[in-house]
Amino acid sequence: MSIFYVLGKKGTIEILYKIKEGVNSFTSIKNALDMEGCGVSTRTLAERLNELEDENLIQKDGSKYYLTKKGQEALEIIENVMKWEAKWKEAKIPKIIIGMLGDKER
């Protein structure tokens, strides 16, 4: 399975961030996601956690989940992409470039 496929699924990045923040048991992750309005079903959360483990982004130790080095690096990349997106959303892009990009909303 492609890591992009896994990261693109509903709730996956939010789950990684919760684990990074120290919210690391199944129940606490579920509750935290529900409180933020990004709730996923119990079944979906279990699937996402298994997929993240399969991709070696997280590891389970007893009943707790932790980011692996790969997971930490993935979040750093995601954060950089988010910063990049924010930069370009705010930037004044010349109309000719917008046309080349096919972005009619700018």
Image (cartoon, rainbow, N blue to C red):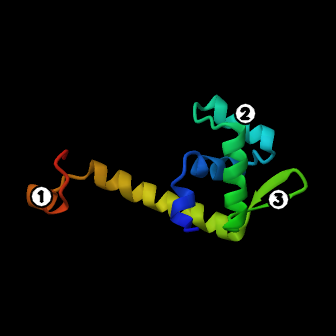
**Residue that mark 2 sits on:** 31
Label 2: state its secondary structure.
Answer: helix
SS at badge 1: helix
Point out which mark residue 81 bears: none
The image quarter containing residue 66 is: bottom right
Which of disc 3 and disc 1 is earlier in sequence? 3
Pointer 2 or 1: first along the chain:
2
Q: Residue at horizontal 72%, vertical 57%?
A: 50
Which numbered dot is residue 60?
3
| Residue at (66% x, 70% y) in the render | 70
Query: Is 82 located above or below residue 33 in the figure?
Result: below
- Image position, residue 94 (x, y; %): 12, 57
**Residue at 81%, 45% in the rendered image:** 25
**The N terminus lies in which quarter of the figure?**
bottom right
Foreground: 72 or 38? 38
Crowd tier of the residue under label 1, counting other residues whose Cα lies within 10 Å: few below 14, some 14–19, many 20 or above: few
The answer to which of 90 and 75 lies nearer the viewer is 75
| Mark 1 vs 3: CB contact within 8 A | no
Mark 3 lies on a secondary structure that is strand
Task: Determine which of the numbered discs, if any, sits on residue 99 in the image.
Answer: 1
Q: In this orientation, which residue lies closer to the viewer: 85 or 52?
A: 52
- The picture places residue 3, in percent across and down from the top left corner, at 56, 66
The CA distance from mark 2 to mark 1 is 44 Å
The amino acid type of the residue labelled 1 equals Gly
Decide if residue 20 is in sight here. no
Q: Is residue 40 left or right of residue 19?
A: left
Apparent side of residue 94 relative to residue 15 in the rendered image (left or right): left
